[in-house]
Image (tube, rainbow, N blue to C red):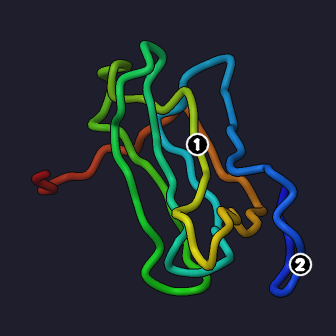
Amino acid sequence: MGSPYPGGVDDGRVGYEIRFDTPQGRAGFPRVWNIWSLTRFCNKAGDLLGTHQNTMGREFVGWMSDGNDQSTWASRMGMDGLASGGSRQVGYSDNLFFGIYVPTRPGWRG
């Protein structure tokens, strides 16, 4: 999925969304664009779990739940962008990673 390239024309697409039929305990993908890229993770009820704004041109953005509590599992990942130079371009994303299983983390404290 992607958007106009540098110097391209804003075609009105200001966001993309990935929806899972079954909520996932972990989900993520590389976001490639710039510091204007925003990613939001929501649960099945539509509650916002987390938001990330890129700090570099390319970075892996992901969500890992708090364990077996499915209200903390991602059901939707929204990708959009802040206005930059008069247009809202979202960049592109690839290599979607996801899974229901959330590994136990001995000694880990959130």
**According to the image, label 2 marks what residue?**
8
* Element marked by disc 1: strand
Which residue is depicted at the point 57% across and 40% down?
A: 77
What distance separates the C-alpha of mark 2 from that of mark 1?
23 Å
* Element marked by disc 2: loop
Front position in the image: 36 or 104: 36
Location of residue 61 in the rendering, given as x and y in whole percent from the top left corner = 51, 63
Which residue is depicted at the point 48% across and 17% down?
A: 44
Q: Earlier in the sequence, mark 2 or mark 1?
A: 2
Front position in the image: 103 or 5: 5
The image quarter containing residue 103 is top left
Q: Is residue 74 left or right of residue 50?
A: right
Front position in the image: 90 or 61: 90
The image quarter containing residue 9 is bottom right
Location of residue 59 in the rendering, given as x and y in whole percent from the top left corner = 55, 77
Residue 78, numbered circle: 1
Neighbourhood count class around disc 1 (C-alpha, 10 Å): few under 14, some 14–19, many 20 upward: some
Q: Is residue 38 above or below residue 103?
A: below
* Amino acid type, callout 1: Gly
